[in-house]
Amino acid sequence: MVSCDDMQEGLGNKTGHQCCSKRKVKRGLWSPDEDEKLIKYITTHGHGSWSSVPKLAGLQRCGKSCRLRWINYLRPDLKRGSFTAQEESIIVEIHRMLGNRWAQIAKHLPGRTDNEVKNFWNSCIKKKLIAQGLDPKTHNLLSNNYIHNNNNNACKLISHQYSHQQTTSTFTVDSQINDISMDMKAPLIPFPTIPPVPDTNPPYPPLLHKFSSISTCEYQNPNTLAFLESGSKSSIGSVPVSSSTSHPSEFGMLDESCMWAGGYELIQSIKSEKEQPELQVETIEKTNELIGAGQNMVASFETSTFDFDFVESTLLPCGMYYNPSPIVQPAWNSWALQEKK
DNA sequence: AAGATTTTCAACCGCTCTCGT
DNA sequence: CACGAGAGCGGTTGAAAATCT
């Protein structure tokens, strides 16, 4: 990490750092004293231009290093400690959609940084997926060649677990897929029959379908992807709602199902959370903001606590409330007719 | 108990993106 | 439109900590 230049001047001292070419900068681990200076400066003045922070804060660091230290370690809103199982599943789910876009993934985990998510992925989740016989890049099943030709611990673990993985996988969707040549972004399971179109006025019909491949479907939807990329607020506590956010009108009838499925998954997640006594369930702080309805309807939620009854009575209907586009209306009607028979 | 090996994670690097001029 | 500066991102490194032998 420390170059030859650095070694000549003691730990981490170097001239010619790219972003601070005129200053001698210290590198390497931050001392408590440096942390204190940075915290004091930013809490008093804000960071402003990062390149000017070191000088103003009295630090012999480059601005980039200050920024990183603040964002990844000193920021007061950071959540420290181990990742929860729920956070882990969110990471896996979003990674399946977006790949190694750590900053985007981190935006769905309040208090976590991209660096933290990336480290957690590389040190933990990746191994778990491999142990389950899943390729961490594609989330598809690993080939037998991969499993048997790689002589590392994870792969040894696979050879032990592989025969059970079809039924024990935590991540249900891709474990059903046997064609490893399939592109990761392609739909992995057949789309289910379209559920009935809801009436535009309450009361709304119950959700009839639950799918296991929501994110895979959603990946097809460029608006949803754009939404995720934009880093929009999208969690209720740690329950991701991105899968219930896409307006179907521009993507054909299949996305209509996905939106329903997403809504259902969301509510199920909340329900299962509510059964955990340690979960704090209080009041909604901000919810169901519908953005750009008709084009890219997005339900935006930002809260760490919520009222369950409100969620059930309001969010679910919100998730389903839309005017079906002319494209999908006939399909919905046709489905409804079949159901009546 | 001690050395070797592996794992974790803070920090850095180099690149791209964005924005102002 | 071109350019430069700063911000932000993902990949990578390597010291420290944890685990193994």
Image (cartoon, coloured by chain):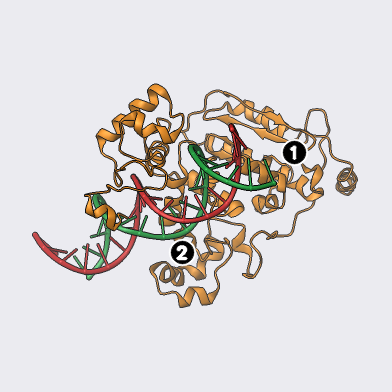
Chain colours: A orange, B red, C green
Look at 48% across and 64% down and name the residue there.
Answer: A130
Mark 2 secondary-structure assignment: helix
Badge nearest the viewer, 2 or 1: 1
Left/right placement of residue C21 relative to residue A96 reads left
Q: Is residue A341 above or below residue A48?
A: below
CB within 8 Å, label 2 to label 1: no
Instruction: Name the image quarter holding the N terminus of chain A.
Output: bottom left
Mark 1 secondary-structure assignment: loop
Query: Residue A59 appears in which quarter of the rendering?
Result: top left
Tag 2: amino acid: Ala
Q: Is residue A3 visible?
A: yes
Q: Chain of mark 1?
A: A
Q: Is residue A311 above or below residue A93?
A: above
Q: Is residue A233 visible?
A: no
Query: Label 2, on which residue?
Result: A131
Left/right placement of residue A292 relative to residue A129 reads right
Q: CA distance from mark 2 to mark 1?
A: 38 Å
Query: Label 1, on which residue?
Result: A296
Query: Which residue is more in the foreground, C13 or A60?
Result: A60
Percent x, y of residue A152: 39, 71
